[in-house]
Amino acid sequence: MKDIKLSDADSARLVEVFSSLQGEGLNLGQRQIFVRFGGCNLCCDYCDEPDTIPIPSGRLQSRRQLQQAIDKLAQERRHEAVSWTGGEPLLHPRFLAPMMDWARQKGLRNYLETNGTRVAAFQEAAALCDTVAMDIKLPSATGRQTWSEHLEFLRVAPEKIFVKVILTSQSTQSEWRQVIRLMQEAGIDIPLILQPATPIASVETIEPALAIEFLNQARALLRCARIIPQWHSVWGMP
């Protein structure tokens, strides 16, 4: 995909800014400020934020407007981090990196959620990331193969990264074997999170027995693998 001008150093398209508990992955339950960018370079059938996919989506906001929104939320209660999410936040690297630097100066950690395909953009912000939650996208969910992009991303990722794979009824054994091979080939010790898809109208989640089988396969070859479902819907929170 060609780079599309969704932002510059001073403004970006944002869908929403809000306070909530992190509902996925290794930081489950942590209070964070969520900055949701508009636009994504992929279209996953299980996406729980489909309004963020179209390019362009969201409303153009300045860096100062976002800083004011984050400041207001930070004054209302204690937050551990800013979750830079989307959409795909790495479609906005010139805006993202200075904002991450500003958040660090405010005493907030930077939690980046990404689909792990925008390697050059990631390198602009990598040093500012405290946690990177990277998805490995299965072809059965996206309709395309992104294995090579994921491998390149993992090879340049900082230490504080974990990989999340969302599993649906369409996830296959061959896809899962490729996930494990990819993580081994990356050559770094990375936690792997299996996340059964939250069912929506067009998507069914993986059968529990198959998810356990995938987990056992991963544990036989990787140091850290866990099943952690998405909790937003359970908590009734955004």
Image (spheres, grey):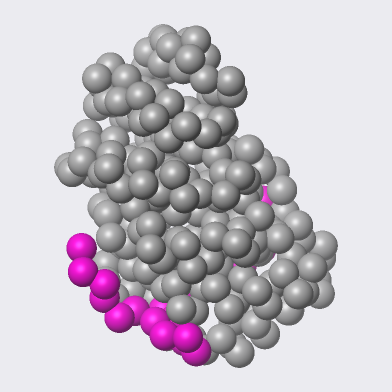
Q: x, y percentage for residue 104? A: 72, 69
Along the line of sight, the residue nearer the viewer: 23 or 179: 179
Q: x, y percentage for residue 93? A: 44, 72
Looking at the image, can residue 229 be seen? no
Where 56 falls versus 152 (above or below)? below
Q: Can you name the residue that lies furthest to the left here?
A: 143
In what quadrant of the picture does the C terminus appear? bottom right
Residue at x-position 67% and y-position 85%: 68
Looking at the image, can residue 194 be seen? yes
Residue at x-position 75% and y-position 57%: 80
Q: Quadrant of residue 145?
A: top left
Residue at x-position 37% and y-position 68%: 91
**Is 78 within the magenta?**
no
Instruction: Give the left or right position of residue 42, taking residue 107 as reference.
Output: left
Residue at x-position 32% and y-position 62%: 40
Q: Which residues are magenta?
A: 1-21
In what quadrant of the picture does the N terminus appear? bottom left
Q: Quadrant of residue 181?
A: top left
Along the line of sight, the residue nearer the viewer: 237 or 49: 49
Instruction: Give the left or right position of residue 106, taking residue 90 as reference.
Output: right
Where 228 falls versus 57 (above or below)? above
**Is 19 within the magenta?**
yes
Q: x, y percentage for residue 6? A: 34, 79
Q: x, y percentage for residue 186? A: 43, 35
Instruction: Give the left or right position of residue 193, taking residue 151 as reference.
Output: right
Along the line of sight, the residue nearer the viewer: 205 or 38: 38
